[in-house]
Image (cartoon, rainbow, N blue to C red):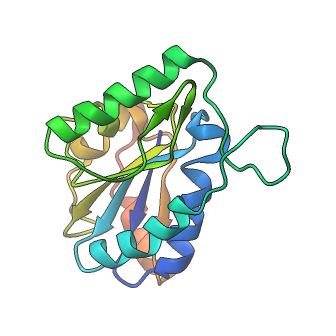
Amino acid sequence: NCPLIVLPDADLEQAAAATAIGGYVNAGQVCISTQRIYAHRKVYGDFIDALKPKVEAIPMGAPLEDATRLGPLISESEAVRVESWLREAVEQGGQLLTGGKRNGAVVTPAIVTEGNPTMKLMNDELFGPAVAISAISSAVCFDLDLVGIGLLLLLGCFPGRYQMMVLALNVLPDFEDH
């Protein structure tokens, strides 16, 4: 799923609000939903602090109810798979900050911090209601291997300045070479 980069001068409330929508719409079962977040070390903790209450406030329920923003996954077996990926992420060093509880086909919206490249959650499409967050030291110099070129179909970027976004996007490789 889509990576998102949060730069040091980003509007963290705006980035967190967009993540709380983009990471959890349709219970995360959208191939362009936000799943992997690369937040600059300078704002990593503050971004997480802004995101957590927004994710915990996502109204869950029956899909046809107007107030519902997160319903069940397509099947209980998919919910079991999502739950196992979250458990695996924790076993590989991630911290389950919130969510990840399963009841039938419903998985509560989850945030995994300390994301690393060994996790399926950082490399494969989850198709579930969870995001993983990694700290990076530079938007320009972060290791593109960590992003997973195969999954870099779309890239969200929350810079404070347009020039930083252009600079970050200019380091992306020419996909015809891969």
Query: Horizontally, is 78 left or right of 115 in the view?
Result: right
Q: Residue at x 57, y 39 (%)?
A: 28
* Image position, residue 39 (x, y; %): 32, 66
Foreground: 38 or 93? 93
Query: Horizontally, is 177 left or right of 155 in the view?
Result: left
Is residue 91 in sight in this rendering?
A: yes
Q: Residue at x 51, y 60 (%)?
A: 56
Residue furthest out toward the top: 77
* Image position, residue 108 (x, y; %): 51, 43
Q: Relative to residue 116, is residue 89 depicted above or below? A: above
Q: Residue at x 51, y 70 (%)?
A: 15
Foreground: 60 or 165? 60
* Image position, residue 72 (x, y; %): 64, 31
Q: Relative to residue 80, is residue 4 depicted above or below? A: below
Residue furthest out toward the front: 103
Foreground: 131 or 117? 131
Q: Relative to residue 53, is residue 66 depicted above or below? A: above
* Image position, residue 80 (x, y; %): 43, 21
Tell me how many marks there are.
0
Q: Relative to residue 33, is residue 136 depicted above or below? A: below
Foreground: 147 or 163? 147
Q: Residue at x 85, y 51 (%)?
A: 66
> Which quadrant of the rendered structure holds the C terminus?
top left
Is residue 123 in sight in this rendering?
A: no
